[in-house]
Structures are given as structure tokens and as C-alpha cells.
Image (cartoon, grey):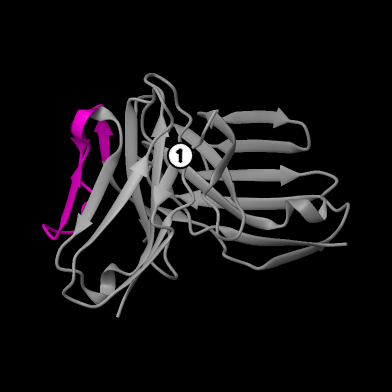
């Protein structure tokens, strides 16, 4: 069974540009999460989808971040326009309905210059 | 005060030693406690989780939770060089599909 996959693995963009990160959860997992780790800090929760619906987006830093999960399968996280402080590693995780275990992808390393 | 405190290390021990990794937390509403292992350039991998206070054992790994002290521990027996990684504690309020609150992680090095 394939795990959680994320694309790209690394992205370098200039301040003011737009970047879209993609996450493909484990097949059949209704719950999808986005997290971010800024250098020197802990991994922080951004938001949670149940199928295609946003269940909790309390961790989204501001309105420059837009997450979507059309059709309840893969998800995208768009940052527009990117700022220097958006640099970090963005992780996606998924879990089955009713189960505690969250399975993480390898992350996308975003560098904003 | 951060919600979850974890010493980032590095913690370096000789092969075969017993390793103790710890986290403290401030929010008494946390009920589920997890330990993740993360190798360099990889995503976190769930090792164990416990509900409320008590111990849980899985092979060489033992997780302990003391809710009265707001203190959780992970013990690794007979440590191996392959155990070298960053260990992250994480916790959540309920048994539903909440987002996790993480510690910073402890970088563990097992010396052959």
C-alpha cells in the first residue's frame, strides 16, 4: 500500500510569488491534515479536512494560505503571495475515519528568498 | 509558556544503553499521547500512542504517561544505531480526528 505522497519535495521561490503544494493521502483515508515546521520550531497544525470539507482551519496563519481538497482525494495548499517567513517544511498526514493514527508524508521543503 | 516542552538535545548514548526521552505539557485537557520517530529528510512515523495515564510496551519501546505531573516518557531498551533519529512527542485532546500538538523533538544519537 502506498503511503502519503507530497509534491514537490523541495521548492525555492522568490518573495511575492505563488506556490502550490500537493498531497496525496493514503487511499481510503477520509481525514487529511496539513502541518508546517518552521526552522527551530515545533511542527504546527494548519488545518484538517474530512473528505472535501474543512473541519478545522484554526492553524492557518493568514489569508495568504488556501487549502483545497476537491473530490475528497488529494489536497493542495497554495501560498499567495509568499513571504520570507513562510519558509519551512510542510507536512501532510492522513488517517482513516475513527482511527487515531496519522500517517505523515515526507514533506515539502519550501524556501522563500 | 509553550504547550509542549521537549529538550531538543542532541542526546548521545552508547549502543545497548537504555534511553529515556521526555516531554512536559501545560494543557491538562490532553488525553492522547503519541511518540513519533523521524529520520532525516523523512516524515514522522508513529511509534506508539497511549490514552490517559499509564504504561504501554511494544518490543524495546515503553511509553509512560503521568497526567498528574503532565509528564510523558519514552524508554528505548537495548538501543541500536538504527534508533538514531529525532523523536517527537505529540498529543491531542480527544479521540476524534483532532490536529496534533507537537514538541520540538529530541535528536538521539546511538554510538556503535
Residue lying at 72% horizontally and 44% vertically, measured from the top left:
B75
- Residue A22 as seen in the image, left or right of residue A61: right
Look at the image and tell me whether residue A67 can be seen: yes
**At which x and y percent is residue B86?**
61, 57
- Is the C terminus of chain A in the top left, top right, bottom left or bottom right quadrant? bottom left
Magenta stretch holds residue B20 = no
Residue lying at 61% horizontally and 29% vertically, measured from the top left:
B54
**At which x and y percent is residue A10?**
41, 64
- Is the N terminus of chain A in the top left, top right, bottom left or bottom right quadrant? top right
Q: Is residue A61 above or below residue B37?
A: below
- Residue B58 as seen in the image, left or right of residue A111: right
Q: Residue furthest left?
A: A63
Give the residue number, with chain letter if any, for mark 1: A4
Q: Is residue B10 above or below residue B68?
A: below
Q: Is residue B70 above or below residue A1?
A: below
Look at the image and tell me whether residue B67 can be seen: no
Span of residues in magenta: A48-71
The one of B45 and B6 positioned closer to us in this rendering: B45
Q: Is residue B33 above or below residue A60?
A: above
Amino acid at each position: 500500500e502506498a503511503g502519503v505522497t507530497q509534491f514537490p519535495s523541495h521548492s525555492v521561490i522568490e518573495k511575492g510569488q505563488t506556490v502550490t503544494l500537493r498531497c496525496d493521502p493514503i487511499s481510503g483515508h477520509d481525514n487529511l491534515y496539513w502541518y508546517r515546521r518552521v526552522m527551530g520550531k515545533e511542527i504546527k497544525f494548519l488545518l484538517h479536512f474530512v473528505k472535501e470539507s474543512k473541519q478545522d482551519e484554526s492553524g492557518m496563519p493568514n489569508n495568504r494560505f488556501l487549502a483545497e481538497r476537491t473530490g475528497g482525494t488529494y489536497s493542495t495548499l497554495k501560498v499567495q503571495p509568499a513571504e520570507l517567513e513562510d519558509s519551512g517544511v510542510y507536512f501532510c498526514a492522513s488517517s482513516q475515519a475513527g482511527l487515531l493514527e496519522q500517517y505523515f508524508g515526507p514533506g515539502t521543503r519550501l524556501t522563500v528568498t | 509558556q509553550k504547550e509542549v516542552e521537549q529538550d531538543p538535545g542532541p542526546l548521545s548514548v552508547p549502543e545497548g544503553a537504555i534511553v529515556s526521552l521526555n516531554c512536559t505539557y501545560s494543557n491538562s485537557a490532553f488525553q492522547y499521547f503519541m511518540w513519533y520517530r523521524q529520520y532525516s529528510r523523512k516524515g514522522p512515523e508513529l511509534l506508539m500512542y497511549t490514552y490517559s495515564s499509564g504504561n504501554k510496551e511494544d518490543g524495546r519501546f515503553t511509553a509512560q504517561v503521568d497526567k498528574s505531573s503532565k509528564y510523558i516518557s519514552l524508554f528505548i531498551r537495548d538501543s541500536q544505531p538504527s534508533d538514531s533519529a529525532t523523536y517527537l512527542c505529540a498529543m491531542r485532546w480527544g479521540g476524534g480526528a483532532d490536529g496534533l500538538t507537537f514538541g520540538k523533538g529530541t535528536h538521539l544519537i546511538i554510538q556503535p
